[in-house]
Each structure stands twice: as C-alpha cells, then as structure tokens.
Amino acid sequence: MVERFTAPMAQPVDLERSCHLRRRADILTVYGGFDEAWYRGSYPDADFFGGSAIDHFLLFGAGLGRGISRAIPRLAAEPELESALLRAPTVSYCIPIMNRPDDIRGTLRANLDENRAFGELVEFVLAFLDDDVPFHTWIRQEFAAEIHSGYLRVIEEQPLPIWHFGRAKNAHRKFASGKVFSSLDGDNFVTRQETEQLLQIFERFGPNFIFHHFSGNWGDGTSGRVSSGMHFYEEVGYDESFLPRQYDEMDFILSTLHRYPGTPLLRLSAENHGLSSKRSQSFIKKSRLKMEVIEVDPVERRPPLNPKGGDYVDGDRLTGTMQTFNQALCFSKNSPTASLRNEYITMAQKARHALLDEVPRSQVIKMIFGRDDFLPRDFAVGPHDVCVFSCVKDDEVFLPALYQHYKALGVRYFFLVDDRSAQPIRQTLPYDDVIVVEPTVGNFATAKTLWLEALMKGTLGDGQWALTIDADEFLDLPAPYTSLTTLAKDLAARGADFAPGVLIDVIPRELSSDFDQRLSTDGFEQIFDHLVWMDQPPTEDYLSSQPIRWGFGPFASISWALDIRYHAFGTLDTLRKIPLLRIQPRRHLNQGFHSLHNADGTEPGTEIWEHDILLPIRHFKLLKLFSEAERYRIASQLEAREQSQYHARTTDNIRRIFGDEWLAQVERLMALPRRVYTPAIAKLAFASMAKNSHRCNDVEPQAMAPGSLEPAST
C-alpha cells in the first residue's frame, strides 16, 4: 500500500454531531411511530431539555437505548431500528442527481449490492436536485429495505434552476455522516475493491487526506471522483461561484492543499493526472504550493454508463472557456501574493470575454444569475431608449438620488446587479422599472463586467443603448441635449456607437463639524458642488505615467486639470470612462468601464477625446472620506488586502487615501484650487483644452502591453 504520512491536523467544522442527528431523523421519519406523549411521560428529563421530545430522543434517547412508543419501550425490542439509528458509517458515497433518472436506475442497485460486504462502514446518500416526484417515489419503494436500514439515504433538496457541479456536490454537506466524503456521479459505479482501498487509506491516514481517483483517461468518469476527510469537504467544499462546469474537483483539491499545507494528496499511478496540465503545473510552481504526493496502485473498477471521449473539453469551445474561467478563479483565490492574484484575474477577464461570445443569448442570463424570469410582462425597449446597467454593493446612500437623477434624464430601465448588499437593493429602490438580480457566478474582481454584459446580452438587442455607471457616478448632459434619448438619437445619426466621459471628483465648498447630519438633511448633491481646477501645465512625471498615457495621451491636460486625487494624495487613477455605448456582438467592457474590447483585439484609443461630445460625470467617491460612517465601512473592507474587491494598485490607492488620519487628508483636498461645478463649465473646459493650447502635442498615446493589467478601476 502506502507509507503513513503525518499531516498537520485540521480543525473539523462542528457539524459531525448535527449530521448524525439528521441521519437519525431520516431513519426515524422513514420508520415512523414515534409517540411524543408516551416519550415525555416515560422520560421526564425530556421536559428539562427545552426542545421537542423527538429532538431529545435523537440527541440523547437513542444513544441510551430508549424506546419510541408503548409498543417499542426499548430499542432492543426492534433490532433493525436500533441498528439503523446507531449506525456510524466510515464512508459516505455522495450522489447528486438532477433530471437523469436513467443513470440511477442503471447504477444504484449494482452499487448497493457490490458493497453490502462492508455492512455498517458505508452509506450511500442520494440527493435529488429536481422535482421528479414519480421517480423519487419509485426509489423509495424499490429500495425501501436499504432506506430503512440507513444503508441508503434519500434527500430531496431545493431543485437547481440549471445543473451546477459545485452546488450539486455541496448538497450533501448537511447530511453525510461518515468520516470520509466520497464524490460519486449518478452514472458511476463503485467496486468492492475501490471501497476496500478507500477504507485502507482511512485506516492509515485518518481523516487528513485527499484522494483523487482519476485513472488518467479523460472522459471515463473518474476525473470527478474525489475522496477526503469529511471535515475538508465541510470546511472547503466546492466553489459555488464557479461557472456550472469544469475544474470544480481540482479546485477542491488545490484549495484544500492551500488551506492545509502538508496534507497528503493521494492519486492513482498514471502518466496523466488531474494537475498535470501546463496551467496547473505553472500555478503550483508560482504559488510554491507544498504538496506531498503519494501514488497508489489502481484497483479493479467499472466504467460509467455514459463515458465521454477524451477530447470532450477541446472539442467544445464553451466547455473550454468555462474551464479557463474556473481555473482562473481557483488560482486567483489561492495565490499567496497580490501580483500573482492579479495575473489570474487578468486570465479570468480574457476567459469571460470568450465565454460571452460563445453562450447563446437565450442561455446567458440563467447561467450567470440562476433565473431568467425577472423581466416585467410589458418589457419593451425602443431603438433610442437608454437603460442603466450597474453593479452595486452597500451603496444605499447614493441609490435614491441616483434613481431620481437618471429618471429625470429619461432612462427607460435600471438593471442593477446586487453584489450581496447588507440592505437589499429591492428595499431601497422598490420601483417597477428597477430590475435587480443577484449573481450566482464569480466575484466582483473577476466577474463584474461578466454580470453586466450577461444582462445586456440577455435583455437588449444589438444596436440598443446601455449606460454603464457606478452608484456614485452622476452623468450630466451637455447642452443642447435634454435627455439621454435625444443624445442617443443624435449619436446614431452621426454614426457613433459610444460617447466618452470624464470622471470629475466633487468636494464640498467648506468643512463642517456636523457633516453626517448635513448629509442626511441636505443631501450629498447639494453639499458636494465644487471641483478642483489646476491651471498650471502638467508635470513630466504625470504625463509619462502609464495610466495617463493610456487614457489620455496628447490630451493629458484634461485629466491633469481635474485630477484631485493625484494633486492631493499622489495616486494615479484613470478618469477616463466610456459610459454610453451601443450593444454590439463580440464587444466587451473592461472592469472600470475605461475602454471597450473587441474580439479582434482592437479598442478605442486616445482619439476618443477628439469627439465633440464629452460627458461630464460627477463622481461622489470622496464623500466616503468626509463621512464618518462611510470611512468606517471602507476601513473594515480593507482590513486585509485579500478581501479587497479591486485590483492591487487601486487597493493601494484607496489605502493611501483612506488609511491616514482623515482630517489631514481632507485638509489636503480643501487646500486645492477649486470652483463651482456646472455642466456648462465642464463642457467649456473640455472643449478649450481639447482644441487649444492645453493639448500636449509632444506626448504620444501609449497602448497597454498585451496581457498586462487593465488600468485600475476608480
């Protein structure tokens, strides 16, 4: 077999007892006949427990051998029930199933018969994730004896809207009661030799191991077979933020090894193994992941009912892009450094573009949000209507004013992605034209624009108009436009498919000791009514910085004059935005809406500033520096770099702004030259700088290097 390897002991999640109680509850429910009045009368200590009599029995009575009714005063009188209740299996074979009854019809009887030799050491836990009631009933009737004994347990969970490996595999976390978790697909067979091998591994290693049963042949049903100590499954488990398929089991393995360095990874002796791909090997080397690999000899196995060809991933572009995206999520979350994490965030960004190009319009919404029934019955968008698309998290301070502002500009619908806000957006904006969805895939750093583009692709047609903003961004229309609809109509007539904008950080006219009180009474739009204005020419350092050269090139004076954060704190963010655009196939947003990426590799450069329509965007981000409540929230979000939702440079910039003594930071801001903000002033300033002496003709625009990080989001 294998030599014993001692790994650091992981602290198990305290679910073992509750899982056993659920198992006992399952058994008792199937058996029936529990008499609560009799139990309380026979065992007065149940009244001191504070819960129900059946809970007392499950927690204490069963272990003490107490009975369940007058007919069964002691469990010893019903040996079959006693054996089922006191069963303590070592291995839990966990089988999720959704809308594939033929798989279970073809494998379950064979698996149960094959492994009866192990008696009390094994349980099979079948979790139904569909609403196929006739089939569920058939299972309970066909396998009644196995269910009564506890050898087979049948769980009916909330049906999944679509099949998702991570959510399906995690369905057993509340129910499996063995010391070892072992994943088994519905069409998989498990032989007696495989179970014997797994029990031997547990005998030698205890619960501190992870075992990949992959044979080395892709598509033969073994790549998804993973066994581990139950506490690894309960604490690490499968990542439910992944796309529905691919790399889920490898993430479970890598995430476990990352969290518990030194845990032995057992795998079958084979030339090919689950982590042998170039990307996986590169990550292991770069992350310096500590792995103790132990190879074991293959044993007799039986192929699955539905084997796939070995090239099933390479032959399907959608499957391949899902694998790349999920790999990137796995590698980024398990990266030990910010720079390595950003490398894999960039990988995820490229994969999401390919994914959106491949997923059909009819499927994309359900894949990303788990549902597609949120549009109102009378939903209709005209050719020049403009819809807002925004990702929001805990920005309720801005949302009511945001809605009123853009409603006044003629926005047709508001599509808002609620990134797990503490106060749900639906409570803040309970309006019929506000459509709120919650993502089921990815996180902010890797999937913000995946969420928004999926919404655009699934709700708007090609050529329709979208306005991409953050909750603290208030776009103003330059004269003579009176609505976004008239602007969109004019742009279309000119043959333009987007309009550029510039972020203008606004600040108050003066400091106030009762700022938060004024904020609640006067409103932030009335308080933050000034912009910074720098008349002197930009410095060489500013002109030569990569974010400025990429974003503005020869028009850097536009940014310089308004760049309050650079002048106050020395941080470099890009103030460039492309907020208004027409939906086009194979066109994508970057994370901060600073540019547009086309599938052919092209993107608009600094010539966008030659456009004669420039949109000023009041940016209220610095409100969070002036408000005590908001400063506290920002500080709590940035306690650890790993928790930041932004790229590394943007995170560092936020730390520099919000990390020092706040009053000193505010004083730096208030010492800068400033003037009252009006859209007219902004328009005149942009036109003046773009056409006259403020243009820096000696500075050439510079594209971002291929594969480099995108400019930091502001």
Image (tube, rainbow, N blue to C red):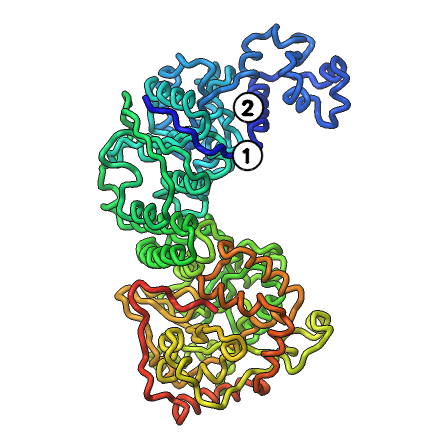
Residue matched to label 2: 23
Residue drawn at (58%, 70%) of the image: 402
Furthest residue in direction top, as rendered? 77
Relative horizontal placement of residue 623, taking residue 315 as reference (left or right) = right
Task: Kindly identify which numbered label has been placed on residue 13.
Answer: 1
Q: CA distance from mark 1 to mark 2?
A: 17 Å
Q: Closest to the observer: 230 or 144?
A: 230
- Counting the numbered discs, the total is 2
Q: Position of residue 215 (x, y in %)?
A: 27, 31
Marks 1 and 2, the one that precedes in the sequence: 1
Where is residue 288 shown, x and y percent of the image?
A: 36, 46
Q: Residues within 10 Å of mark 2 (few under 14, many from 20)?
A: many
Q: Nearer the viewer, mark 1 or mark 2?
A: 1
In percent of the image, x 41 and y 30: which residue is there? 209
Q: Nearer the viewer, residue 394 or 371?
A: 394
Q: Residue 170: x and y, percent?
A: 47, 36
Q: Are marks 1 and 2 in contact (CB under 8 Å)?
A: no
Q: Look at the numbered disc 1 and give the secondary structure of its residue.
A: loop
The residue type indicated by label 2 comes to Arg
Q: Quadrant of residue 203?
A: top left
Amino acid type indicated by mark 1: Val
Location of the N terminus (image quadrant): top left
- Relative to 542, does residue 289 appear above or below in the rendering? above
- Estimate how packed mark 1 is, as few (under 14), some (14 to 19) or many (20 or more) residues with alpha carbons within 10 Å: few
Question: Which residue is at 42% across, 23% downward?
Answer: 202
Q: Where is 168 relative to 198, above or below? A: below
Q: In the rendered view, would you say 409 is above or below 419?
A: below
Q: Which mark is residue 600?
A: none
Residue 180 at x, y = what percent?
Answer: 45, 26
* Above/below status of 504 relative to 658: below
